[in-house]
Image (spheres, rainbow, N blue to C red):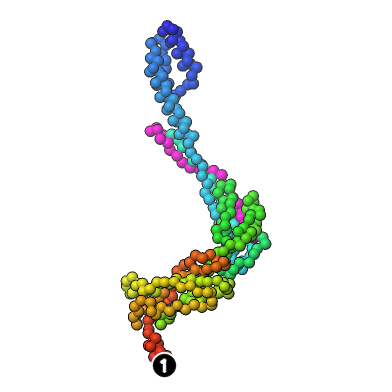
């Protein structure tokens, strides 16, 4: 192929190609620098592609609005109605001269739902138990989840209109009452605990974990003894701490304690730690003398 035919073929291919921004003009009266034109055309194409990419990038996000609904043992089986609002935000990006992009958000769609929960064929709860659910609206998506419940529930209806109706499926063990067992320490260093719900745990066991501490003014309190005891469930429990470590008359002591239910009524996790009041240590002989003096 001669130079004239090659030049005409190359020119025809340029005319047939898409027009690109900043593509250098071709002067057909001069000798054509084909490699140079191709290189500049590719660079211009990359530049245009970058602009298109920057303008098309962005995204969407929605805010989530949630409400928790809780039912205690003596509460009605239907909750009030709650309004939820979820807002959509659209990210848009514009190209910058330095090759980067400047992005910003603008509001998009707003989604609203009025929600409620009703328990059908509700089963009895133990006095300290509760059913807690969480309903969330995220964009057009509405959902309900069990947070902590005394039963496993199935959804009868409500996914479409937010008026949830739930039905119990089977009983679940819940955590025990965190303050169902309360303790006191007396001057003889006997820890006595009263079990408020003993009748509900008949035939089961309980574990009591304790830490005996000495009150040290303006400093860290001293740990005197730690331990745990197990017992059959009854209305009261007594733990003798008078021989646990070195105790001094006239010093102030207290006990931190928690309990664990062993059986099927509740889960077997320890409750949160509670504390007795601070009492001044007195030997049994001193206590007898005080009583006789009265």
Residue 233 at least partly seen: yes
Residue at x-position 64% and y-position 50%: 160
What span is in magenta?
A: 96-119
Residue at x-position 34% and y-position 72%: 222
Q: Is residue 10 above or below residue 206?
A: above
Q: Is residue 7 magenta?
A: no
Q: Nearer the viewer, residue 167 or 67?
A: 167
Mark 1, residues whose alpha carbon is within 10 Å: few (<14), some, or many (≥20)?
few
Q: Residue furthest bottom?
A: 293
Q: Is residue 9 above or below residue 205?
A: above
Type of secondary structure dominating the magenta stretch: strand
State which quarter of the image contains the C terminus. Answer: bottom left
Residue highlighted by disc 1 = 292
Q: Nearer the viewer, residue 49 or 29?
A: 49
- x, y percent for residue 272: 47, 67
Element at label 1: helix
- x, y percent for residue 279: 40, 79
- x, y percent for residue 108: 54, 43
Q: Nearer the viewer, residue 111 or 164?
A: 164
In this picture, residue 74 sits left or right of residue 93: right
- x, y percent for residue 63: 52, 49
């Amino acid at each position: 192929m001669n130079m004239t035919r090659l030049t005409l073929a190359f020119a025809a291919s340029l005319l047939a190609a898409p027009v690109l921004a900043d593509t250098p003009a071709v002067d057909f009266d001069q000798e054509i620098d084909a490699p140079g034109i191709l290189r500049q055309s590719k660079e211009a194409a990359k530049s245009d592609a970058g602009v298109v990419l920057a303008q098309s990038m962005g995204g969407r996000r929605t805010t989530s609005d949630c409400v928790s609904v809780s039912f205690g043992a003596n509460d009605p089986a239907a909750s009030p109605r709650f309004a939820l609002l979820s807002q959509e935000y659209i990210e848009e990006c514009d190209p910058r001269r330095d090759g980067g992009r400047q992005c910003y958000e603008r509001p998009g769609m707003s989604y609203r739902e009025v929600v409620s929960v009703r328990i059908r064929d509700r089963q009895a709860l133990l006095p300290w138990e509760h059913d807690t659910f969480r309903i969330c609206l995220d964009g057009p998506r509405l959902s309900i989840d069990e947070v902590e419940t005394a039963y496993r529930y199935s959804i009868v209806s409500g996914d479409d209109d937010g008026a949830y109706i739930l039905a119990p499926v089977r009983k679940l063990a819940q955590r025990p009452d965190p303050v169902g067992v309360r303790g006191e320490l007396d001057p003889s260093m006997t820890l006595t605990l009263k079990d408020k719900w003993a009748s509900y745990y008949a035939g089961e066991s309980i574990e009591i974990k304790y830490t005996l501490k000495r009150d040290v003014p303006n400093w860290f309190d001293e740990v005197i003894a730690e331990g745990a005891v197990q017992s059959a469930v009854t209305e009261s429990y007594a733990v003798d701490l008078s021989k646990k470590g070195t105790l001094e008359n006239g010093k102030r002591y207290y006990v931190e304690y928690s309990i664990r239910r062993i059986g099927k009524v509740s889960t077997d996790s320890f409750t949160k730690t509670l504390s007795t009041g601070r009492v001044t240590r007195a030997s049994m002989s001193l206590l007898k003398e005080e009583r006789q003096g009265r």
